[in-house]
Amino acid sequence: EPPSALVSGPGGLDHLEPLIMSAAARLNPGGVLFFEFGFGQKDEVRSLAERADGLGEIRVHNDLAGIPRVLEAHRS
């Protein structure tokens, strides 16, 4: 992994926050955002997606070990 994928600010979300907040503006109508996040970041990532304008139908998917790992958000 590149260092930027492993070190993203004190909370580990410095790279994900701008991606989430600008996602709806970059998605086509009906588009879906999927991305992986780190262990223990579920609540923070879900909260960001819920606050982002234009995103809805937010779901979190577990990996094969049952750990919350992937966020799904649809352009609303």
Image (cartoon, grey):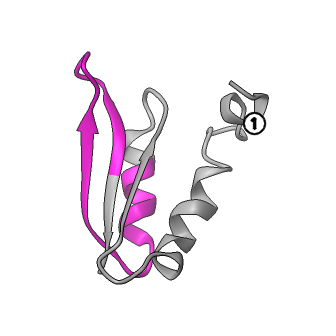
Seen in the picture, residue 31 relative to 9 is either above or below; the reply is: below
Q: Residue at x 62, y 38 (%)?
A: 12
- Residue 63 versus residue 48 in the image, above or below: above
Position of residue 56 measured from the top left corner of the image (x, y, whole percent): 28, 72
Percent across and percent down for residue 75 are 34, 76
Which residue is pictured at 54% across the width and 69% down the height? 21
39 left or right of 55?
right
Q: Where the N terminus falls, by quadrant?
A: top right
* x then y, percent, for residue 34: 39, 52
**Residue under numbered circle 1:** 4
| Quarter occupied by residue 4 | top right
Tell me the SS state at disc 1.
Answer: helix
Location of the C terminus by quadrant is bottom left
The residue shown at (43%, 30%) is 40
> Within 10 Å of the Cα at label 1, are there few (<14), some (14-19), or many (20+) other Cα atoms?
few
Residue 62 placement (x, y as % from top left): 25, 31
Q: Which residues are magenta?
A: 45-71
Q: Is residue 34 magenta?
A: no
16 up-or-down from 61: above or below: below
Relative placement, left or right, of 31 versus 24 is: left
Q: How many marks?
A: 1
Vertical placement of 51 versus 54: above or below?
above
Which amino acid, mark 1?
Ser
- In which quarter of the view is residue 19 placed? bottom right
Whether the magenta-drawn stretch holds residue 65 is answered as: yes
Q: What residue lies at 44% left-to-right and 50% top-to-bottom?
A: 45
Q: Residue reaching furthest top?
A: 65
